[in-house]
Image (tube, grey):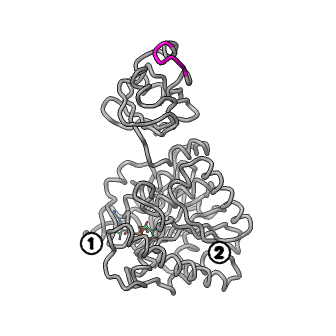
């Protein structure tokens, strides 16, 4: 974390050409009082102004469940999945209508894009989603993205739109992810319970100290600051800056994009990683765990090598060839994840063995490595 005196990259936002703006539930629904039409109109005006200056803006908007609850007259967020799905279906309608109407005032078209985790985890569907979104952006249409809450189950959900926003920023190689929420930014403690909490103006997206101060969300939002910090970390993988700011600040988007020091700016420190590796890194579901010995950890981290069975100590989980597994060191710390070339049973039989023995042990050899370096991302 850094003090306010250290300016770090505010000017980077002034040069941003493609920006993902994520608007959270708490803000959109004015803490549960239904869609805040006036506020939405204000954000749309700012997005349209940016658009006129040539900035491409993609919107990730929450609020379907919260808006649906209000339309249905429900006081509390239901816990049953089918009720959440119903509320989302009702609310998403209102959300789309509202954005469409406001953008139309500026002569801009919108496109509703509802995604599930599967759409981004299956490589083919990921590439499809990417080309559809790129086409919309090229057509100067404003995509309005949300999770497809009506069909998702817990197994396949992003859960919070901060993560979805970051994955969209990766997908489109956006320069910045702007997360608008109901607080001024990230504080050194949750300001809801700590009136003394201080705003963190700038920091590094992968500073581990940030996770320690970020708490959970309010009654309407899902992720709180914890998911916003994780989102910044994910967005940084494609080189995007993340700004977290209050959507209630007048002209927040245009001021942020003019380099004004509002909210919290988290900068990417590492060189952007290649698109395929980012896709791997964005995968949320892992089917198993490989425990690596110290030598394997070292070569993965330092030389970007493939993972060989000889460096694996233990296998856990029921995974099949091609599934995503995580690699941990002997203390359980996550080291990498990747797509495995052998299913769990075969992997268990070859662990600790040199590659030239694989054929003799299994009767076949899919590949000499357990995870090829092209399918592996070090975390
Ligand atoms: N360190 C922190 N700084 C700021 N807000 C925090 C922090 N930790 C937890 N929060 C909570 O996160 C909430 C915002 O997240 P959330 O409710 O998920 O909203 P959204 O719908 O905008 O994503 C804030 O209202 C706040 O109570
Ligand atoms: N997809 C959900 C949004 C999930 C959610 O609330 O996310 P967030 O705004 O990040 O706390 C909806 O539209 O209701």
Q: Quadrant holding ligand 2?
A: bottom left
In this view, the residue in front, 296 or 264, is 296
Which residue is located at x 29 percent, y 71 percent?
192
Classify the position of the N terminus by image quarter. Answer: bottom left
Residues at marks 2 and 1, CA–CA distance in whole angstroms: 39 Å
From the top left corner, tell me how far across and down residue 33 is, in percent. Answer: 39, 85
Q: Which residue is mark 1?
A: 195
The region drawn magenta spans 360-365
Q: Which residue is mark 2?
A: 110
In this view, the residue in front, 111 or 293, is 111
As drawn, 340 above or below 265? above
Q: Quadrant of residue 189?
A: bottom left
- Crowding at mark 1 (Cα within 10 Å: few <14, some 14-19, many 20+): few
Q: Is residue 5 visible?
A: no
Q: Earlier in the sequence, mark 2 or mark 1?
A: 2
Which residue is located at x 34 percent, y 59 percent?
214
Which residue is located at x 44 percent, y 58 percent?
157
Q: Judge whether residue 47 is colored magenta.
A: no
From the top left corner, tell me how far across and down residue 34 is, in percent. Answer: 43, 84
């Amino acid at each position: 974390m850094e003090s306010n005196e250290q300016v770090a990259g505010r000017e980077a936002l002034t040069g941003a050409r493609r920006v993902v703006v994520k608007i959270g539930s708490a803000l959109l629904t004015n803490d549960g009082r239904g869609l805040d039409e006036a506020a939405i109109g204000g954000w749309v005006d700012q997005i349209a102004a940016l658009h006129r200056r040539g900035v491409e803006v993609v919107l990730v908007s929450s609020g379907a469940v919260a808006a649906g609850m209000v339309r249905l007259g429900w006081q509390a967020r239901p816990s049953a999945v089918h009720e959440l799905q119903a509320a989302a279906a009702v609310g998403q309608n209102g959300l789309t209508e509202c954005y469409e109407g406001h953008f139309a005032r500026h002569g801009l078209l919108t496109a509703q894009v509802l995604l599930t985790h599967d759409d981004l985890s299956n490589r083919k569907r990921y590439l499809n989603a990417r080309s559809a979104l790129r086409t919309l952006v090229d057509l100067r249409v404003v995509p309005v993205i949300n999770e497809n809450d009506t069909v998702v189950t817990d197994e396949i959900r992003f859960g919070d739109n901060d993560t979805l926003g970051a994955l969209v920023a990766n997908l489109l190689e956006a320069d910045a992810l702007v997360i608008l929420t109901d607080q001024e930014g990230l504080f050194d403690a949750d300001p809801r319970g700590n009136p003394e909490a201080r705003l963190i103006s700038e920091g590094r997206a992968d500073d581990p100290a940030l996770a320690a101060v970020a708490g959970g969300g309010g009654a309407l939002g899902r992720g709180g600051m914890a998911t916003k910090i994780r989102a910044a970390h994910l967005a940084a993988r494609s080189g995007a800056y993340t700004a977290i700011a209050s959507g209630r600040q007048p002209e927040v988007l245009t001021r942020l994009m003019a380099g004004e020091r509002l909210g919290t700016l988290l900068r990417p420190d590492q060189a952007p990683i290649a698109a395929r590796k980012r896709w791997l890194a964005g995968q949320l579901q892992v089917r198993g765990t490989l425990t690596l010995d110290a030598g394997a950890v070292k070569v993965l981290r330092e030389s970007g090598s493939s993972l060989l069975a000889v460096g694996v100590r233990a296998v856990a989980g029921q995974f099949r060839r091609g599934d995503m597994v995580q690699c941990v060191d002997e203390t359980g710390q996550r080291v990498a994840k990747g797509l495995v070339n052998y299913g769990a049973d075969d992997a268990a039989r070859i662990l600790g063995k040199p590659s030239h023995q694989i054929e003799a042990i299994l009767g076949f050899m899919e590949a000499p490595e357990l995870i090829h370096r092209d399918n592996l991302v070090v975390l």
